[in-house]
Amino acid sequence: MMLQLAGALYALTLGVAEPAPAESMVVFADAIYTSTGDVIENGAVTITDGKITAITPGETPGDGDLHVGAITAGMVDLSAHMLGYESVEQSSEITPQLRAEHAIDWFGVAWQRQASSGVTTVLVSPSDRNVIGGLSVAVKTAGQPSLEQRAVKRDACLRGAMGSEPSSGNHPAFGRPTDFYSRRPTTRMGVEWEWRKSFFDAAQGRADGAEPTAQAAGLLEVLDAKRPLFIQTWATQDIRTAVFFKEEMATEGFGEINLILDAAAEAWREPELLVRSKTAIVLPPFPDSGRTRDNAFMALSTAKQLVDLGVPVALSSHGAGQHRDRLGMQGALARRGGMSLEEALQAVTITPAKMIGIDDRVGSIEVGKDADLALWNGEPFQATSRVVGTVVDGELIVDPR
Amino acid sequence: MNMHCFQSIRRAGAILALAALTPFALADGKMVIKAGTVITLDGDPIENGTIVIENGRITAIGADVQAPWDAEVLEYPNLTAFPGFVEALTNRGMDRANENLDVTPFLDVRDSIDPVNFFFENSLRAGITTLNVQHGRNCVIGARGHVVKPIGMTVEQMSVKPRAGIVLSAAPKGGKSSATQAQALRAAFGDLRGYLEELVHDAKNGSDKARREALYQGREPDDETSKGRAMEGTAWKVEGLETIPRWEIDEKQAPLLTLVEGKMPAFFYCRQPMDVRVAIEVAEDNGFLARTTLVLDPACWKAADLIAERGLPVILSSTLMHVERDPVTGDEIETFVPGVFAEKGVRFALRSETPLNQSLWFQAARCIGHGLSREQAIAAVTTTPAELLGMGKRVGSLAAGKDANVVLFSGDPLSVTSNVEYVVIEGNLVYDRAADVRMRHVETGEQPENTAPADAEEFDPHPEDDGAGEEEADEGDPADDEKSDEEKDD
C-alpha cells in the first residue's frame, strides 16, 4: 500500500504516468491472406500496441469476437490524389524542392473514402500540372491528424509528369507573354525538354564543381538513387520517353534512376522496354472499354501480362472518384484480366509498398509489422464481396459489426 | 482524306464481322443444350441438365429429358447455363434519347433505335438478351418504348415487344422547375380530356371534323378501330366516347388514352424524393398507377416508405450507392440503395452501369456484397424486370414454354473470373466468345485484322500505321532490340 502510494506520488511529482496496459485486439477470419504467399484458413490476427504480434491458425471465434470472412493487409495506393484540386505552382515548372506534405488537408473527406475501402497507406503527390511537381509523402489514411503521427515515409519519391497534362492549359505567347501560362511548355516536346534540361543542368553543374541550387539538389538526389522518380505517363509515347530518359541519364554517367511509372495504361504495348530498364508500373483504374486518358488504350489483361514478365505492378484508384474505381474493385478487375487472387493481392499491398521502400512496416500480415488490415465479408477481390472493416495502426477505424 | 477513307473501310469491315455474328431469323429447327449446371431460376439448379428448344421456345428442361433424335445438340459439360439477363430500362442504343418537345407520346423509339450501335453488341457479350429501350428522362411525357433483343440489322428483326410502355418524368425537364413540370404533366392529361369531350360534342352536333382530320393524316379504319368503344379505365371517363370510331382519335392523343385506359405500362422518372409524390398523384388521378413502374435516381431511397405503402415496383439507377455530405460535419454518408428497397419489401430491378465489364451480372454481384441474398440480387436482373415489362411468361427464367434465351457461363455467373462463352437467343446461337475479336481486343490489346476501335472516327491509336491492321503492338524499334541485346551481354 505504502509502496503503491509512493509510486503514485513519484509518478505525480515527475509528471510521468505509469505505462498504460498494452492495448490488445484479436480479429478472427475464415481466411487470412498474408501477402507472403500464405493463406491461413480459420485463423486469428493478434494486435498489440498497433503492431501485429501473432498470427494463429486453427482459431475458433467465441460469441462477441470480431469475426470476418477474410483478412488482407491494408491496401497501399500509390496514386491516390489526396490533395484534391490544386492550382499550378507558378514559381517554376521544375520544383523538386516542394513537398506535398505541406499541402495535406487532414480533415478532407478523401481520407474517410480511402480508409473505408480498406486502403490504409497512400502516397500523396503534388499536382501533375507541373513538369516536376515535388516530393511525395507516404501516410496512413487514419489516425491523429498530423504529419508526425501519420507519415510512413517522408520524401518517399520525386513526382513528375510527362504527356499532355503538364502542358495542358498553357498557350504560346504571341508577342509579349501575357501570363504565366504563356511561358510554360505548351507541347510534349516542351515538357520533355524541361525534363532533360533540368537534369542535365544539375548533373553538369555538379561536374563543374558548382554549389547545387535547391532545385538541382532535388534532382541530384534522384540521380543518386536516394529515392525513386515517379512519373505519370499514360500513353506508349510517354512511357518510351520516360524509359529512354532514364537510360540516357545512365549512358551519360549522370546516375541510375530508380523509375516508377504512374498511370501507365499502355504499359502492355512494349513490356520489353520495362523489363530491360527495370521500371516499376502503377496502373490506373481499369477502363470499361479500353480507353483512358491521353487516348491510351488499356487492355483488361495489362496487369497480368506485366506480372508474367516479372515487371513489378501495382494497381491504383487514381483518385477514387467513382465508387467502382476504389482499390479493392481494381483487384477484382485485375482478376477478370487473368491475375490470380494472390497476384491481385500483392499488386495492392506488398508490391506498392516495396516500390517506395515501406515494406518493412506495411504491405503484408507478418509479426512485427504495423497492424493495418482490410476486413472483407467474403473472398477478397470478388464482385460479390467488399471491405467491411479497416484497422489502421491497431485502431478499428471501420467496425464491420 | 486518305486516312478518312481507310477508317471507313475498317468500319465497314467491323460491321461485316458483326453481321456474321448475328443470324437473326427465328430458328424453326430443334436444338438441345446440355450443360454441366443449369440454373433455371424456376426451381433448384439442375446438374447435367438438358434444355430442349423447338421453334425458338423451350419445350422441355430437366436432368433426364429425352433429346429429340433430329435436334442439333450443343454439349457444354463444363459450362453453366443461365437465363439471359433482362435490362429493365435503357436510353442507350438510340440516335438521341430525348426530344425538344415536352409531350411526345405519339413518337416511337423504334424510329430512333440504331441496330448497329455498339451498345447492343456489348449487351450481347454481357449476356443481356432482352432490353427495354425507352425515351430519356428529359421530357414531360416521352415516346413509346420498344423491347428488343440485341441482335438483328433492323428494328423489326430485333423486336420482341413493340409499344412496350410510355415514359413520363416528374423530374423537371431542362429549363423547368418542379412546379412547372408537375403542372405540365397535369395539363397533358387535362388536354386529352378536353379533346375527347370536344370530339363527343362535335359528333353529337353532326360534325365530321375528326373523320376528315383522320383521313387527312392518312389513317384508315380497320376491323377493330372502325367501331367506337366506351372509355375504359378507373380514374375519369368521357361519356359518349363509344360514339367515336377509334380510328378517328388524333394520333397525337391516342397513346395517352391507352395509358388512361390502363392498357399501357408507364415508366415514371423521379430524380428527387419529392418527385415521387408528383408521379404517384399524376398516375393515380389518371388511372394508370397499377401499371406504373418508378424509375429512380439514387436520392429517391428517401421516399422508399411512400413507395412501399403504394406497392409500386421500381427500377433503380445504375449508381447503386447514394452519396451525400452531411451539411454540418462534412462527412460523407453512403447509402446502398437496393438494400433500402429490399428491406421495405419493394420489388426492384437494376440497370447496368456500363455495357462491357460492369453489366447486370456485376450489379447483382455488388448487391450480394452489400448483404442482399443471392435470390434477391439475381431476381433484380432477371425475373423482376421480366415481370415489370409484362413478359414474365416469356423471359427471365428457363422453363418449358418460355423464349429460349440461354447464356452459357464458364463458371458462377456472378464471379469476376467467369465469362460469357455462348449466348442463345430464341433458339439461335448468336454469340461465341472464341469468335469475338472485339472482346479479344479489349482483353488483351491484340487488334485483330479488319477491326477498328469502337469510336474509330474520334480516335486512332496509330495514325501513322496505314498497314492492313498488322500486329504492331509487340514490334519495337529495331534499334531498341539492339540496345536490349547489348544490355543482356552486359
Image: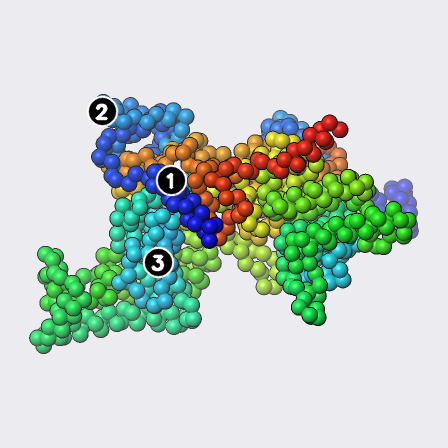
The residue at the point 65 percent across, 31 percent down is: A310
x, y percentage for residue A255? Answer: 80, 41
Number of numbered discs overlaid on the protein picture:
3
Residue A307 % position (x, y) = 62, 33
Q: Which mark is residue B324?
A: none
User: Residue tagged by mark 3?
Assistant: B135
Chain hosting mark 3: B
Q: Amino acid at mark 2?
A: Asp
Identify the amino acid type marked 1: Ala
Decide if residue B21 is on the left or right side of residue A125.
left
Do residues under tags 2 and 1 come within 8 Å of each other at their CB atoms? no
Q: Are marks 2 and 3 on the same chain?
A: yes
Q: Residues within 10 Å of mark 3 (few under 14, many from 20)?
A: many
Mark 3 lies on a secondary structure that is loop
Distance in Å between CA atoms under marks 2 and 1: 30 Å
Label located before the other in sequence (2 or 1)? 1
Q: As shown in the figure, which amino acid type bears the numbered disc 3?
A: His
In what element is the residue under mark 2? loop
Label 2, label 3: how far apart the Cα atoms are: 44 Å
Q: Is residue B445 visible?
A: yes
Chain at tag 1: B
